[in-house]
Image: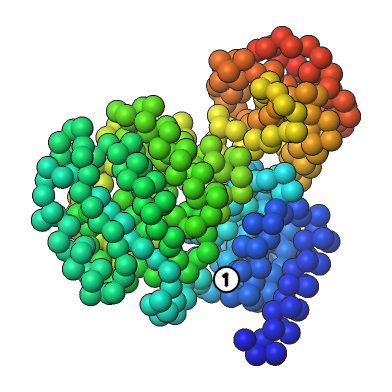
Amino acid sequence: MTSADMTQAEGLRDNLDQLLSSNGIRLGAAQRRRLVWLVERLGNATCHQGASDPVRDSGVVVVVEPPSGPAAEMLYRSLRANSAVVIPFGENPAFDFLKSKLTDFGTIGPSLDGPHEMWWGGLNWRAIALDGGPPNDTPLRVVSCYPRACGDDQVRWLRDKLAEFEIASDIAPIETADGGHIRASEKTAFMLRMWHEHREPLLFIEANATLTEPPRLPSSLDCDVALHKWNRWEMSARTLFLGRSPAAEALLQTWHHIASAYPQVWEGYLLDQAWSLTSSQMPLDTVWLPRSYHVPAEDVGTPRHTTVVHNLPADNSDLGPDAEFGMAMRTARRASRSGGRDSMIVVKSEAMASDVVTVIMRDIATSDAREVAASIEALTGAFAADCGGFGRLELSLCSWQDDIRAAKSAARSANNRIIEIAPWQTLPADLFRTVGQSRNSGSVVVMTGQRG
């Protein structure tokens, strides 16, 4: 990088810091790093307010207020092909409509220093995919496994392509309890073994797949995990990238733990639950891989770009065997956020205690986005200042009564204390201390008060 390039990059970062500060946007370290990554590739960032004019000359558009339908359409039409949209309060379902018009690129989970889910997307992947990809010496190891009982004929195409592209790989047979079928627990055990045996980022590709070009994109994204969401909501474990980070390892271990506990549940749902748990507890940097990394064999020959081709029917009926299985999470996963029945953020305290407090924030759909964001920050800040003796805070955002009932049921089953609050209500400074003095597990403390 030349001195002129360094000066320009420094100027872009200074402008970004000013934008975040002037608009009261709190980002965690991982979220800010991703935003800087985007600005350095696409150009300067500007802030788009709910009623402001569309911005045509920005590489990165930061949206802090959910636009109305017409405003979302205007914003969509004004975007350049090589631009990205960043939503720093991505946990709020009010942004779902805007997200639905764009391509999901990724999301980064919350943390205590940035207690929001940051979503980023754009018009198409060409905006951020590097021309020609990174150099061939970019660290990457492709791993795959197959049932020993099936023999190695099914991996021949994948092995041949990896050798042709000179990509390091480790493809191995494993013992399986169901003969020719690999359970999720067996796949995750294999991946954990690969994680400990190798030091490169890992790209798992299903053994019966093949490559049409080197899979360079995942390792160029500097993320914790990259995978594809079929139909924008169903997580697939057929192509899965894991960066060398503690968050990636935590996701893999959580997935293996859940898969071992529920061996009959299909792997996509188990991966979804592991992702939800991990991203609520740490700023998991997730990238949603484009369709080119999850192409059914029947799609080959269409104008669609391909990288990883899987030997499966075009309808992907083998992903989720029960079409209704993931209904409760589909809306949230299409918007790359936690659902109302999941914990949006889990914060651990310094207290050596196992007691947990669940906070249910209701009326999300009827509240201002800034109001919700400020309430989340106030809650996590209050817990950090005085945890009241609780070892952990779990915060769920609930738009509907069904979500509230499900969140309460889950909290009661875990013997958690429960606080129900609306975004506009003022928190007493000793909220958690007061609630913590009464150890009646499962009871609900409902904050009262009218909207000001």
**What residue appears at the point 40 percent right and 66 percent down from the top-left corner?**
140
Counting from the top left corner in percent of width and height, residue 328 is at 46, 31
Residue 40 to residue 117: above or below: below
Q: Which residue is mark 1?
A: 83
Residue 360 to residue 146: above or below: above
Residue 129 to residue 256: above or below: below
Quarter-of-image position of residue 36: bottom right
Q: Is residue 311 left or right of residue 7?
A: left
Q: Can residue 273 be seen here? A: yes
Counting from the top left corner in percent of width and height, residue 217 is at 42, 68
Q: In this view of the protein, which residue sits in the foreground, 367 or 403?
A: 403
Q: Is residue 419 left or right of residue 129?
A: right
Around disc 1, counting alpha carbons within 10 Å, would you say few (fewer than 14), some (14 to 19), or many (20 or more)?
Answer: many
Name the residue type under label 1. Ser
Q: Can residue 101 be seen here? A: no
**What residue appears at the point 44 percent right and 44 percent down from the top-left corner?**
252
| Residue extending furthest toward the front | 197
**What residue appears at the point 33 percent right and 61 percent down from the top-left corner?**
142
Q: In this view of the protein, which residue sits in the foreground, 300 or 354?
A: 354
Quarter-of-image position of residue 60: bottom right
Please identify the quadrant where the N terminus is shown. bottom right
Label total for image: 1
Q: Secondary structure at mark 1?
A: loop
**What residue appears at the point 76 percent right and 37 percent down from the top-left corner?**
380
Q: Is residue 386 left or right of residue 149?
A: right
Counting from the top left corner in percent of width and height, residue 40 is at 63, 75
Please identify the quadrant where the C terminus is shown. top right
